[in-house]
Amino acid sequence: MRIKHLLASVTVLVVLTAHGASATYNVSEYCQLVTPGTKLPSLDSCQTYYTCQSGGGYIPSACSGTENFDKNSQSCKASSNSVCNIGLDNPCSNVKTEGWVTNPNDCTGWIYCKNGATAGSGPCPNDQMFSYSKQQCIYGKCTNNNQGGDVQIENLCEIMPNYVYFGDFEDCSAWHTCTPELQNGNCKIGLVYNTMRGMCLIDDGNMCNRIVNPDGPPTTPCTSTNSGKSVGDTMICSVYYVCNGTTWVRNSCSTIGQYYDAPSGTCMNRQFAIPEGPCNRCQYAGGKWVNAVDSDCQEYLTCNSDGGVAATGSCTTGQFFNEARQACLSITTNDLPSYKMNNGACGKAPCTTTTPGDDGTTESDTT
């Protein structure tokens, strides 16, 4: 079963000491797999850790003095009593028996490990890449490269606490745990793994709406003529792609609460950012309802606690959805042109003072 590496919104720097290349580790992404309150370690400091919150948010913290963060006990411990793998230059260091890992310098290659040491290596066939979770080469293209982008954590047990269950990015019924090696499993037929509660439950329709499936790189070829051009993802508002002359490199906004703004090609506060397409604006939402990407401001989304879309809706004719008020408001008695100017979800639409079919209602609750 493949645990797919996809971008979320927030990154922290890590150092790949085996090859001296810097890359990024997306804390927000992996926080979506665990129950809120779970602590994940930094990969560039033995003292730093991140407490996951719902929807992919997290709070950074650090141990004091000579203590290191221990992911298994989920606490700070004396450095002499904790395990910190930062600085290891052996890609097989966490493989206690035997198995394969992705070549950290080339995702189309594999390394065979035995008893914590390299026992062999080789390339995958053409048009294939190595999948750590499937332990084999699979068809597909690398999502990262050594010139930029986010690093894939092939061994999830490097950051996940032992004997704690966590979810999967692709299969809602799948779960994983570290014993300390990665173990995979599935819920019984008819159940899905609820990452918020850490157990298999009957799906209520909202449990699989995680922000984990990006639209993918632009179909336009990346060449020297458009090198440096950036394009937003149409499904995840905080994700964008930059052409480096040959490949579209996936990136994400570095600040929680920011989306990629298509007109400026920069990241900005989600309220003002104009998305590339109909992306999920429940990401980083402060309320239960948010504007959908809609030129008329009539469409809205109902958000669940995971930052996913639980339902869609539309205001009646003569009304628009006001995210701050969490309600549909009358176009006649409220300033729609000003709202459009200050809310990127419908910012592409031309301002108009026309009032089509006003029914005289000043406010209507979306519920």
Image (cartoon, rainbow, N blue to C red):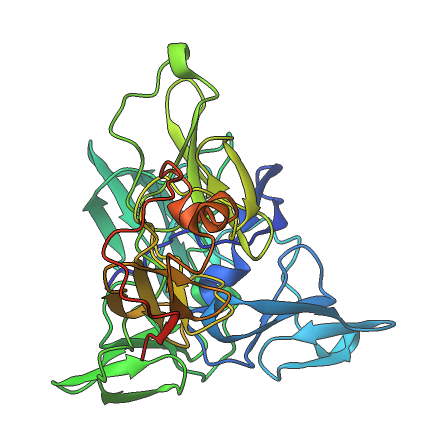
Closer to the camera, 187 or 85?
Answer: 187
**Residue under the point 42% across and 42% down:** 347
Q: Residue furthest front?
A: 360
Instruction: Determine whether, in the image, residue 319 is placed left or right of residue 94.
Output: left
Instruction: Determine whether, in the image, residue 272 is placed left or right of residue 301.
Output: right
Q: How many marks?
A: 0
- Considering only vertical position in the picture, is 108 above or below 297? above
Q: Position of residue 223 (x, y in %)?
A: 35, 15
Whether residue 252 can be seen here = no
- Considering only vertical position in the picture, is 105 above or below 291? above
Closer to the camera, 7 or 22?
Answer: 7
Q: Residue furthest left?
A: 189
Q: Position of residue 308 (x, y in %)?
A: 35, 67
Q: Position of residue 302 (x, y in %)?
A: 33, 71
Closer to the camera, 274 or 173?
Answer: 274
Whether residue 87 can be seen here = yes
Q: Position of residue 216 (x, y in %)?
A: 29, 41
Quarter assignment of residue 82: bottom right
**Residue under the point 57% across and 57% down:** 256
**Residue under the point 30% across and 55% down:** 213
